[in-house]
């Protein structure tokens, strides 16, 4: 697909049953003045580009906006419960809620999110007073 001065050019393989809907959708976009249909129409999905849908790397599935909203609300509720009760079970659920809230907020997979949090904590603590002493103690060095 390419666009220039409101004129959209569509290229590539597509199933015959999807052409009409695609052309209608592209034409309905604000600012589109014309559509140049150069699509390769196929009756069956016998072309490799038409087999399957978009794929994400393993563990990188994206959540819909509604799922993210529910995750943030549930995570926030679990964290509020943790603050109100402060029992071991509530603390555990609060930690789960925190992860759920962050997952919904960022839409990043858990491994990537954990890596980001670790790097932020390391950057934040690097300049803190006593950080050098704490790092040396953890490494077994002399202060």
Image: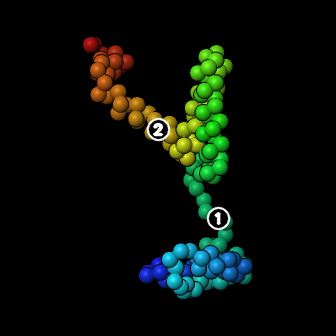
> With 58 as the anchor, is 6 left or right in this view?
left
Residue under the image location 65 percent in, 21 percent down: 90
Q: Earlier in the sequence, mark 2 or mark 1?
A: 1
Secondary structure under the numbered disc 2 in the rendered image: helix
Which quarter of the figure has residue 38? bottom right
Query: Residue 92, image x and y in percent?
Result: 62, 23
Query: Residue 91, image x and y in percent?
Result: 61, 21
> With 38 as the anchor, is 115 left or right in this view?
left
Residue at mark 1? 53
Instruction: Tell which residue pokes out farthest to the front in this image.
Output: 30
Query: Residue 63, image x and y in percent?
Result: 62, 50
Binning the other alpha carbons within 10 Å of mark 1 as few (below 14), some (14 to 19) or many (20 upward) gives few
Residue under the image location 53 percent in, 85 percent down: 34
Residue at mark 2? 115
Which quarter of the figure has residue 47? bottom right
Which quarter of the figure has residue 86? top right
Colouring method of the image:
rainbow
Secondary structure under the numbered disc 1 in the rendered image: loop
């Amino acid at each position: 697909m390419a666009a220039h001065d409101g004129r959209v050019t569509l290229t590539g393989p597509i199933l015959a049953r999807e052409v009409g809907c695609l052309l209608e959708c592209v034409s309905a976009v604000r600012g589109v003045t014309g559509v140049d249909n150069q699509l390769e129409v196929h009756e069956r999905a016998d072309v490799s580009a038409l087999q399957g849908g978009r794929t994400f790397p393993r563990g990188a599935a994206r959540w819909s906006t509604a799922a993210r909203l529910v995750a943030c609300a549930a995570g926030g509720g679990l964290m509020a419960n943790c603050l109100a009760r402060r029992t071991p079970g509530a603390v555990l659920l609060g930690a789960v809620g925190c992860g759920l809230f962050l997952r919904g907020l960022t839409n990043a997979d858990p491994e990537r999110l954990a890596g980001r949090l670790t790097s932020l904590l390391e950057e934040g603590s690097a300049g803190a007073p006593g950080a050098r002493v704490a790092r040396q103690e953890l490494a077994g060095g002399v202060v």
